[in-house]
Amino acid sequence: MLEERFASEVRADDRPQRHPATRVSSWGKAKVITSLAFGQLPECPGQEVKPSGGGRETPSSCMPPIKGDSDDMPVYSAVAKTIKPLVGQKNWEHLRRLRRKPAPKLTAKAAARQRKLDRAAEIAAISHDLNELAVYFKTDKWGGHRYTQHYQRHLQHLKNESFNLVEIGIGGYNRAGQGGASLRMWKHFFPNAQIFGIDIQDKSFVDEKRITTFIGDQSDPTSLLDIAGRIGTLDVIIDDGSHRSPHVITTFETLFPLLRDGGIYAVEDTQTSYWPEWLGSEDLNDPNTTMGMLKGLVDGLNYEEFVDEEYRPSYTDLNVVGAHYYHNLVILEKGKNAEGTNRRNILKARYAKV
Ligand SMILES: C[S@@+](CC[C@H](N)C(=O)[O-])C[C@H]1O[C@@H](n2cnc3c(N)ncnc32)[C@H](O)[C@@H]1O
């Protein structure tokens, strides 16, 4: 009988305590007893309540509320009659207070503030992982493409630095209110960076703290130079704009010289190099395509080893220190390429003649 069972589980001195046979050890267990008395357990899916066994406890989040708001409800009265004498007045009052209270209704302003806080917490939890941020902000740099894994590796050293990142191509094309995904991703990966976007369309709706957009045409050096002058130091440049080879090459020739030493220059979607429909070419060595131009940088890394004494190094020979080629993505490191050569020691016969 219920009464006998509870009598053995709860001391009559108002303080529910550990009982060796039942393991009713805390006030939390008293809640279980009361809930049992109301015939409401087990209601939590997959949970069993074992008040007299050594098994799993029902978590308090699964405790159903005590039903009945007034003493004249039959269930309430029956439970009150049975439990109240067992637990005492003080504990009974406590149990009554356990009835689940509805969450207070938030004002629209408070709800918006709460949503903002929830969102900030969600982003903070993934802010170390560029792939996850890409998915969160819905840029195709991860998913559609596999770029962010490489960016993470090449840009990790800037994670907490204060610097400027510029991306050409904000996204959304001429669709109103669309775009900005990657700029938001960069902003949250680099908490101390200023993020700049350039697009041929007006994307000013993307502007917010640490994100600034400019209208500009990457095929027009004047437009690019004007914007670069307004930004200041260029630490990271990413070309994710028109993906037309002549535009990509113009942008590289205009902005790479302005990139600071130690800076990073990336070109995305280089596959368009091979598509005549996108102003590319089927000729793999056509120097007028994005890949043709970028491939030309490889030998320049080793220009100091050339035996042609007439060779005059180009700007990129002297200023590209690393070139990384991935599927549809190229990442360049800028710096002084002047490590020297020992070719005169090794090619003694050749240089003895000179
Ligand atoms: C692929 S989307 C950029 C996506 C964005 N970077 C992201 O990852 O979320 C390309 C963008 O380049 C812009 N664009 C096209 N031609 C351009 C040009 N000549 N100069 C600058 N932007 C251009 C388009 O308007 C479009 O918004």
Image (cartoon, rainbow, N blue to C red):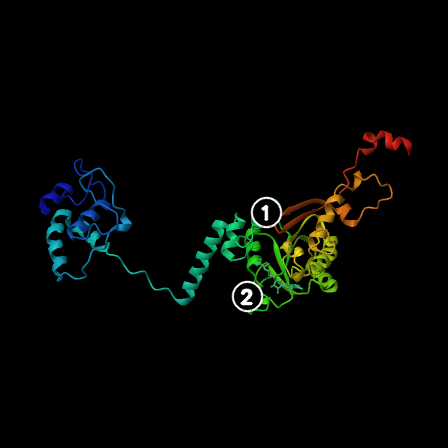
Q: Which numbered dot is residue 178?
A: 2
Q: Can residue 322 be seen in this view?
A: yes
Q: Which numbered dot is residue 150?
A: 1
Q: Residues within 10 Å of mark 1 (few under 14, many from 20)?
A: some
User: Horizontally, is 300 left or right of 132 in the view?
Assistant: right
Percent position of residue 48, x then y:
22, 45
Name the foreground residue: 336 vs 105. 336
Task: Name the residue type under label 1.
Answer: His
First of labels 1, 2 by sequence position: 1
Question: Marks 1 and 2, how far apart in space?
Answer: 26 Å
Task: Name the residue type under label 2.
Answer: Gln
Where 292 falls versus 307 (above or below)? below
Q: Is mark 1 on a helix, strand or loop?
A: helix
Q: Can residue 159 be seen in this view?
A: no
Percent position of residue 20, x then y:
18, 35
Quadrant containing the C terminus is top right
Q: Is mark 2 within 8 Å of ligand 1?
A: no
Count of marks overlaid on the render = 2
Where 253 falls versus 334 (above or below)? below
> What residue do we see at 55% from left, 59% from top?
181
> What residue do we see at 49% from left, 50% from top?
126
User: Horizontally, is 88 left or right of 161 in the view?
Assistant: left
